[in-house]
Structure formats: C-alpha cells, structure tokens
Image: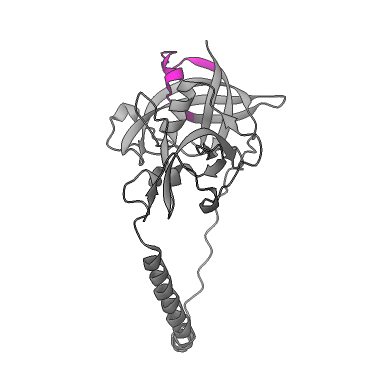
Amino acid sequence: MVILRPQIEQTGLTTYIPPKGDFEAFRDDEHYREKLKEWALSSAKEAKREFWYKDRYVQRLVTIKGYETYGNAGEFNTLVIEFQDGHLSCIHPAYLKEMQQSSFGKESMLTLEDKASVTEKENVTVAAAEPVAAIESSKKDKAAKEPKPKKPKPKKEKAPKLELPAEKVHFTAKVKQFALVYNPFNEENDEVVVLEETQIVQENPLELGLAWCSHSKTLKKFELAPGDMLEFDGKVAAKKLAKGKEVPEEFVMDVPVLYKINNPSKIVKK
C-alpha cells in the first residue's frame, strides 16, 4: 500500500541520484514558467510549484530546484528536485510528468514479475526455434534461382555535418516567418519563430542558414515581424523543426529547418 506522507521523508526507502556538481538554476519566475512549459509539466499562468514523487512505498511532494544539461549541444535536460528533508535528486522530466498521473504505480510488483517470467519463457522458445528456421530457410535459398545482380545505385552525397559549439555563443539572424509545431505533451500547436541568414559570430563565422526557436514571452515583447534583424546569445542544437497539425498555410514551413536555438538572451532588435 502506498503511504501518503509528504511531510515525512523515509530516507532508507528512497534511492537518491544527486546532481554531479553545479546545475542550472532558474533566472526568475518567467524562466521557470517557460522551462515547465518546455517539459510539459505545467502550462498554466501560475506555474505549479510542487509535484508528486511516487515510488512503490510512498508519495512525497517535491520542488524543482533547477536542471542539468547534456548532449553534444546541451539540448537535453535532467531535473534536479528537492525533497522536504533537503535531499537533492535527479529525474527525467517525462518520468516526473508520468508520476503526476493518478494511475502511476498501481501495477503490483508481483504482476511485473509474472510478466517477466512469461517473457523469459517466450524468449527461450523463440531461441530454440531459430536454428530450425535457419536450416529450412537455407534449403529454400539453395533451391531457388539466384537473382541477377543489380547495379548499385549511385549514393547521393550528403551535406557535411556542422560542428556545433556546445557553449553559449553570439548570433545574428533575420526573422523569416512564424510557424506552428505540434506538441504531443499538451496535444496543441506551439508557435515558433523561423530565422534565416542565421550566423554564429566568432573568429571564423559559422553559417547555419535556417534555424528556429520557441516564440517565448521574452521574444513576444519585441513584437517581431518578418524581416526584423536580431542579435542575441544562446545555444544551438541539431533539432529539426517538426510539422504542425492542421495549421493555416501561413504558419507552415515547406523546407527543412535543422537547427534549434535554445534560451536566447541579450536580444537586440535592429
């Protein structure tokens, strides 16, 4: 039976995964709300402050203190949550989201063990049948006529992958248009800004071409329009712009946009 004791920590029953070192803290309440929306944990105007952490024995209320980034360009996040006794632990955003559902954790451990046993037996049966199937297949292959060798099709040359910087860099770009992308977490379309002539300003400038970023509240304050020139700091990741679901034609991008700008700051509109 799950014990609802949000005010009492049972350290011996909980496995903590502490952060590796320093982690990203939220700059302010607006940054906190934007990150919660990005993780699909809350889209309300008043950002949720407490979340349920559930395991086999207890349910406890926790708060999100910050996040860690990982991936080649820091495009992925791991949440850092704090229990009421002060312990810090790391958890994936999607897993914490699942914990908020009332049905989470109701399947008994006995049922899981039974399923594992059945799966193991099925694997043994399949493994035993594989050699027989391989012999029969070999006989059929020998009896069949050998197909004529086909000429290999010439491979299309792929454009070389850009070496994207992992740290925050300075950008210049021009607003191309606005677009809508489908968000499976809230089952709605989110508005994004599509940029063109995107360039990383450094000793040897890096041309990205098309890129995109979330149309956050911070960006909306600038009342952007197509043709506006921008300068800003941010991180870039190789993440393709997804398509929207049943969106008007003016919010559709008909060419691939391969790069996403994360957390643009120090924005200057020219």
The single residue placed furthest to the front in the displayed view is 8
Q: Is residue 87 above or below residue 208?
A: below
Check the image and tell me how it is coloured: one colour
x and y, in percent, of residue 105 in the image: 37, 54
* Quadrant in which the N terminus appears: bottom left
Residue drawn 55% across and 56% down? Answer: 154
**Of the pair 220 and 157, the residue shown nearer to us:** 220
**Residue 44 visible at all:** yes
Residue drawn 51% across and 73% down? Answer: 149
Quadrant assignment, res 202: top right
The single residue placed furthest to the right in the displayed view is 203
Q: Is residue 268 above or below residue 33?
A: above
Q: Is residue 184 left or right of residue 94?
A: left
Q: Is residue 146 above or below residue 196?
A: below
Quadrant assignment, res 46: top left
User: Is residue 223 magenta-colored?
Assistant: yes
x and y, in percent, of residue 186 in the image: 33, 37
**Of the pair 52 and 35, the residue shown nearer to us:** 52
Residue drawn 34% across and 56% down? Answer: 106
**Of the pair 263 and 20, the residue shown nearer to us:** 20
Residue drawn 63% across and 28% down? Answer: 168
x and y, in percent, of residue 258 in the image: 50, 37
x and y, in percent, of residue 139 in the image: 46, 89
User: Is residue 57 magenta-colored?
Assistant: no
Q: Which portion, as a residue range, is magenta?
A: 212-231
Instruction: Say how many tags the image has.
Output: 0
The single residue placed furthest to the top in the displayed view is 270
**Of the pair 264 and 256, the residue shown nearer to us:** 264
Quadrant assignment, res 247: top left
**Residue 226 visible at all:** no
